[in-house]
Amino acid sequence: MSALNSISSTKYLLYLIIFIISGCAEKATTHAFIQESHPSILEYSQTAEELRLSQHSNSNKKVLSIEGTGVVNKTRSHPSTYATVWEHLFSLYTLPEVDNKQVKNEVQRYLKHPEYLSKIQQRAEPYLYFILEQIEAKKIPGELALLPIVESAFRPQALSKSKASGLWQFMPATGRFFGLKQNWWYDGRKDVYTSTQAATTYLKQLGKVFNDDWFLALAAYNAGKGNIRKAIRKNKEKDLPTNYWSLPLRQETKTYVPRLLAIAKILANAEQYNIPLLDIPNSPHFEVVNINSQIDLSIAAKMADTSLDDFFILNPAFKRSATAPDGPFHLLIHTDKTEVFKAKLAKTQKKDRMNWLRHKIKAGENLGSIAKKYNLSVIALLKANHLKNSHIRAGKYLLIPSLLRKTDKHSKHIYTVKKGDTFWDIARQFDVHSKDIANWNNISLDKMLRPGQKLIIKKG
């Protein structure tokens, strides 16, 4: 009987130990990601001791939520210096590591196109260091520096069907709300300097709105705060989970977070995936220079000892051949050329910073007819000549920025747009500038090119 009691006591102790271990294991799994879309396949292969050791060894790493949320541990460990921009980027990673079906699908989708992964690195090179500076200053997850890959494939001239534009794909109204000027001369959504500041500010705000759940914040960046709140409310009413993976979202938003997580994973494990990383130094690629007045961009490019095409890689926001008369008055200049540019700028008087043509007003002409002749807008003529209204007099003169006027004496070539062509691609093919192509064809650089479309290319 005493032996039986001993066995019973032993069983009781075993049950008690199992109960305690189970409670510990349950607590530990609150820091482990569960695939919300496939809850039935969750497996526990670790023993309680393994769980305890795993929890201890991972105590300084990012927090993974049992509900699959994007809540992160903000603690970061930073070496003082980094050899490459990639090392800098990866040190700022804080998003939970997710390995569900959606992320795996996106990883495979990217890996099928290694040439694309190479191209986006080349496109990112001029901008990535500055983006990381803003990410770090705002104390938001480093993975968000890769959002322009998902948004625009790192093309500052990208324009969506819904009129979102720039690296960060700001809608016109959202851009204006965050101070991004948009007018005939300039589109701040394409300004790498101002749009990156605006985007990181917006993302930080969204992080606060959704209590540092960055999956929800990212979904809101894509679909809008209102739509994400509505989806959360619907799930609450049905007593369903309200994490990103469980919400009823449109397809684009469903793939948005997995796509970012996938590209972040591939780049951080590039060697494993046999993806070469471009050697990008962890140093500034450009400097922001205040020019204090309007300047012809061809003159600015010469001052910077840079080709126009290379100049517009850093300054894609300007829609005309000159900066706006009322600003903004900043240019991004390659760090190797900054001192030369500043020295030449200081020696050039404001009146010599623009190339002008004088137009003598004829009887019967008005601002509308003159603007059309020189492929300008009436507003541009008003601003360029500091006119308060459209009243002009025959015999007087108007100043016309020379690079904006038509060049009918040039020989013409008719080019048929092919699938995938961009203004930039065609400009490089004919050794001209993309803005000239837009002017010659009286279309905006924002307009998407259609296969089969005919373009006039003028050669001097």
Image (cartoon, grey):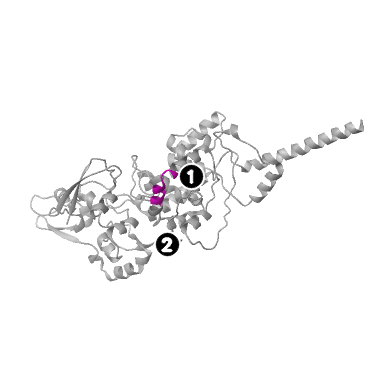
Which residue is drawn at the image coordinates 11% and 50% (left, top)? Answer: 365
**Residue at the outermost front position:** 274
Is disc 1 in contact with disc 2, using a CB cutoff of under 8 Å?
no
Q: Nearer the viewer, residue 157 or 209?
A: 157
- Tell me the element at label 2: loop
Callout 1: 10 Å neighbours few (<14), some, many (20+)?
A: many
Residue 262 circle label: 1
Q: Which residue is mark 2?
A: 284
Quarter of the N terminus within the rendering: top right
Which residue is drawn at the image coordinates 26% and 66% (left, top)? Answer: 350
Amino acid at pointer 2:
Pro
Most common secondary structure along the magenta stretch: helix
Does the magenta portion include 118?
Answer: yes
Amino acid at pointer 1:
Ala
Does the magenta portion include 136?
Answer: no
- State the image coordinates of residue 427 (x, y, percent, origin top left): 25, 52
Which residue is drawn at the image coordinates 48% and 41% (left, top)? Answer: 258
Alpha-carbon span between mark 1 and mark 2: 27 Å
Mark 1 vs 2, N-terminal side: 1
- State the image coordinates of residue 409 (x, y, percent, origin top left): 12, 54
Query: Is residue 296 in view?
Result: no
- Tell me the element at label 1: helix
Chain part drawn in magenta: 111-120
**Residue at the outermost left position:** 363
Question: In this rendering, is residue 324 above or below 353?
Answer: above
Question: In this rendering, is residue 173 above or below 319?
Answer: above
Left or right of residue 291, residue 268 in this image: right
